[in-house]
Image (spheres, rainbow, N blue to C red):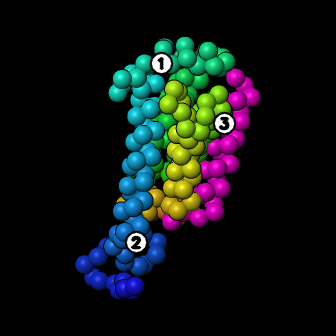
């Protein structure tokens, strides 16, 4: 492993007095994970909120939510769409990562709650594995941190840890519990 030495032509990391290390394989891998999880979530949210990517838009999504027992259905449809869209975009660009992960985890817990009506792997409808994988991906991003190739570079949660991971998991679970209790 090469040690990074300070060079006068490199900017100093704010607050540390140290020159930044170049992006490594783990930063690129985290960028790829963030883009995959984040853009999938953002796309699903855009389907609900705007009808993009073949989505049904808020009114038809609300009708589906009403069948699942969410009342008021339009409120919960927009809440789910906004959580997916904004949480997904936050994860993709690495901005406010613990909060973005919390929003993503919370909405995916709600999706998993309705998925037990289906199998882990299903060819006939939604499977439990899809929201579970996205929730675990969001948690992993918070735990490992978004890395150097993110907008969170100047913040302490850039490198993850128990604090950002615990925050994302607890807030996501709390949000999901509130929604499930009130629906």
> Dot 1 corresponds to which residue?
58
Quick one: SS at disc 2?
A: loop
Where residue 86 appears, x then y in whole percent? 47, 38
Q: Residue 34: which disc? A: none
> Is 32 one of the magenta-colored residues?
no
What is the spatial separation of the Cα atoms under label 1 and label 3, in whole angstroms?
20 Å
In the rendered view, tell whether residue 57 sits above or below residue 148. above
Q: Are marks 2 and 1 in contact (CB under 8 Å)?
A: no
Q: For this rendering, which residue is in front, 148 or 60?
A: 60
- Judged by depth in the image, the label closer to the viewer, 3 or 2, is 3
Q: Residue at x 74, y 29 (%)?
A: 181
Where residue 129 appears, x then y in whole percent? 56, 41
| Crowdedness near tag 3: few (<14), some (14–19) or many (≥20) residues, C-alpha within 10 Å | many
In the rendered view, tell whether residue 6 sits above or below residue 108. below
**Left or right: 182, with 83 as reference point:** right
| SS majority, magenta | helix
- Mark 3 or 2, nearer chain start: 2
> Dot 2 corresponds to which residue?
13
Q: Residue 176: which disc? A: 3
């Amino acid at each position: 492993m090469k040690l990074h030495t300070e060079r006068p032509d490199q900017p100093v990391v704010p607050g540390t007095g140290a020159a930044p290390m170049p992006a490594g394989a783990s930063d690129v891998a985290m960028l790829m994970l963030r883009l995959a999880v984040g853009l999938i979530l953002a796309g699903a949210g855009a389907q609900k909120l705007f009808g993009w990517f073949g989505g049904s838009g808020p009114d038809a999504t609300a009708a589906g939510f009403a069948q699942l027992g969410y009342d008021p259905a339009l409120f919960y449809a927009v809440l789910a769409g906004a959580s997916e869209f904004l949480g997904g975009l936050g994860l993709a660009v690495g901005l406010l990562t613990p909060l973005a992960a919390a929003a993503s985890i919370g909405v995916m817990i709600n999706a998993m709650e309705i998925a037990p009506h289906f199998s882990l792997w299903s060819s006939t409808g939604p499977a439990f594995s899809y929201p579970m994988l996205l929730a675990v991906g969001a948690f992993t991003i918070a735990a490992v941190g978004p890395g150097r190739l993110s907008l969170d570079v100047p913040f302490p949660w850039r490198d993850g840890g128990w604090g950002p991971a615990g925050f994302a998991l607890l807030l996501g679970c709390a949000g999901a519990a509130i929604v499930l209790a009130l629906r």
